[in-house]
């Protein structure tokens, strides 16, 4: 049995018992029932995901997966393709937004080369290169079906190893790849069956003319490659990207290992769509960190049934939204673990 | 000159120079311009408030102001009045939600007794009691005009001392007081000229019958006391509360000392309305931490021109939303201070 199918087979249901215990404790804490809103929901969900009461959120890891995209040659991005490799080096040097926000959250950043168009060597880089950038989806498939499976399995392997070695309680996924909002829009359109113009945004900041070109590229990619919506590996191969496949793999590994996964923005959302189609049960292990400024992100989250924790008009990627939301998730667990109960504090309960 | 009028006189404009420097640095950091959305805006606003580039957000304090309300005898709350004092002791013992969330944010909690109906003694409690609970606003004014000024000035004095002693970079305000969503709804209706039923919510969790009673109480309080919308001290005296006055004072002290103030939920919003009417310039120093589940909170924030950072369906008070949002504000400052620029990281800039 392949790693992908064995991983899918390991994804089970949330623990009803751990969720019940968390709900019972929430009801005894010194606050009006339900008054901490999403924080209460999060603490219960984490207990269910981890199968543990109380849940934990101390050891945190962000996976930032990078790759290049042949479609960048269509002029769909505001930045030159070389920036993917340059930003990977910036991540490894600690100077990017994800480094700052992960430090703030107390999370480690694991940088994975899934397919940067050039050789990058660094002692802290995890190299799982599937290829030197994908094919141009406006002219043919992004990759072969075999490569698509390899990308997903690389994500599974990296995440399983890191989760085991670090004893991670909470992980997040993020991306880097010049041009990658274009394949993400194509993946979104294919799986959610929306029109290209509904799910295509301005990425790093293109003008009207470039946006219209980008919509045409997404439409052409879908017409030319005809991805099969019911077959997520086919969608990934035809119009996806190596880091999108890797992100799907990290998510599936989180679900198989009962580790909650914070989904970042639009590109991570494309990975989450692939993962969620491969395993509807995996959706229960996903937490939507924020609502991206990319218009297609809302469509993705609705399809996945996820409600975003933050709405700060972010559109950077890298895992930045996931890192910011980690602070909220950890807060929810600390409330459950550290607050006094009515009995302990000698506080009267509700009277009506 | 009174402390209140001298404080109002010290509230000046934001520093254009510090904001310009922050904007210039944001444009040189290794990310697409604007891609960190509200985080970029926050870092610029903090520079303008503090009059300092780069701004700082390391030393943080939450002020939790407590008082009782005569109107509690009308059956407008789901909890007995004794809970105000019990919760003050819980804050001082470290077991309440605000303690947990402040620890998570790295903030100190300063608990102030503005008018609890009973004596509370504790070495860490700041006692600035204006009275043993306000009068029942359904039967007469909450307090005299002189008491209203004293409540605001107590908030100013406590905040000025703590800001100076701790060298606080960022403060938050929160409340505790059984029954205090009722005077807050009355303050909101008086100042924003909305109908009682538009701004009255379910507080700690009352049923339909109690909500209808609460709306009638707010309407009667406004008709009977006829607060003058153009005179915020009159509004506070007629239908407010001691902690609402104290919160207004803390906010004004923050503004006068160029310290950004995170406003918590509905009761803090009532204090912010009073502060904002006393000094429209003070609104520039306020940050809305979250959008409360109380329906009147949105009305307050619109009146103040504030956009909430979080929307997590919170309705606890205490400063819990402010503490949670501190993590986001501090993240914005760390991004500005710690990220590499395009030059430093050798990353190419935008091409179109």
Image (cartoon, coloured by chain):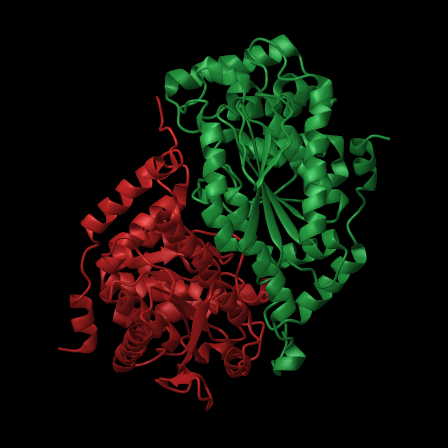
Chain colours: A red, B green
Query: Looking at the image, which is closer to me, A205 or A111?
Result: A111
Query: Looking at the image, which is closer to me, A250 or A31?
Result: A31
Q: What is the count of numbered marks?
A: 0
Q: Is residue B244 left or right of residue B200?
A: right
Q: Is residue A101 above or below residue B118?
A: below
Residue A251 horizontal/vertical position (percent):
31, 66
Query: Looking at the image, which is closer to me, A240 or A324?
Result: A324
Residue B19 horizontal/vertical position (percent):
74, 58
User: Which residue in the rendered view is the most extreme toward the left?
Assistant: A1
Position of the N terminus of chain B by quadrant:
top right
Residue A9 horizontal/vertical position (percent):
15, 67
Q: Is residue B125 above or below residue B29?
A: above
**Res. B316 in view:** no
Q: Is residue B136 above or below residue A118?
A: above
Q: Is residue A40 above or below residue A157?
A: above
Residue drawn at (36%, 26%) of the image? A350
Residue A160 horizontal/vertical position (percent):
28, 74
Q: Is residue A204 left or right of residue B90?
A: right
Query: Looking at the image, which is closer to me, B7 or A239?
Result: B7
Residue drawn at (20%, 70%) of the image? A7
User: Which residue in the rendered view is the most extreme toward the right?
Assistant: B1
**Res. B239 in view:** yes
């Amino acid at each position: 049995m392949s790693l992908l199918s064995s991983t899918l087979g390991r994804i089970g249901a949330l623990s009803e018992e751990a969720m019940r215990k968390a709900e019972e404790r929430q009801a005894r804490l010194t606050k009006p029932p339900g008054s901490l809103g999403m924080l209460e929901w999060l603490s219960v969900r984490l207990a269910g995901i981890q199968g543990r009461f109380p849940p934990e959120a101390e050891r945190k890891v962000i996976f930032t997966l990078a790759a290049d995209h042949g479609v960048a040659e269509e002029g769909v991005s505001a930045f030159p393709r070389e920036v993917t490799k340059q930003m990977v080096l910036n991540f490894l040097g600690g100077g990017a937004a994800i480094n700052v926000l992960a430090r703030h959250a107390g999370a480690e950043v694991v940088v994975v080369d899934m397919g940067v168009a050039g050789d990058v060597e660094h002692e802290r880089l995890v190299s799982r290169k599937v290829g030197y950038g994908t094919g141009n989806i406006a002219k043919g498939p992004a990759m072969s079906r075999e490569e698509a499976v390899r990308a997903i399995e690389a994500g599974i392997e990296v995440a399983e190893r890191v989760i085991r070695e670090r004893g991670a309680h909470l992980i997040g996924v993020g991306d880097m790849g010049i041009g990658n909002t274009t394949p993400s829009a194509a993946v979104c359109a294919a799986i959610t069956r929306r029109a290209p113009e509904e799910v295509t945004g301005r990425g790093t900041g293109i003008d009207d003319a470039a946006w219209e070109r980008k919509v045409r590229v997404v439409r052409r990619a879908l017409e030319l490659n005809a991805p099969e919506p019911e077959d997520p590996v086919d969608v990934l191969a035809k119009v996806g990207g190596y880091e999108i496949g890797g992100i799907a793999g990290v998510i599936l590994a989180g679900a198989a290992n009962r580790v909650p996964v914070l989904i970042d923005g639009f590109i991570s959302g494309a990975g989450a769509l692939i993962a969620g189609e491969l395993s509807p049960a995996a959706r229960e292990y996903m937490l939507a960190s924020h609502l991206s400024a990319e218009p297609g992100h809302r469509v993705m989250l609705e399809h996945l049934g996820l409600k975003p924790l933050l709405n700060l008009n972010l559109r950077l990627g890298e895992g930045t939204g996931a890192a910011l939301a980690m602070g909220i998730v950890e807060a929810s667990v600390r409330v459950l673990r550290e607050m006094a109960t009515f009995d302990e504090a000698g506080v009267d309960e509700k009277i009506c």
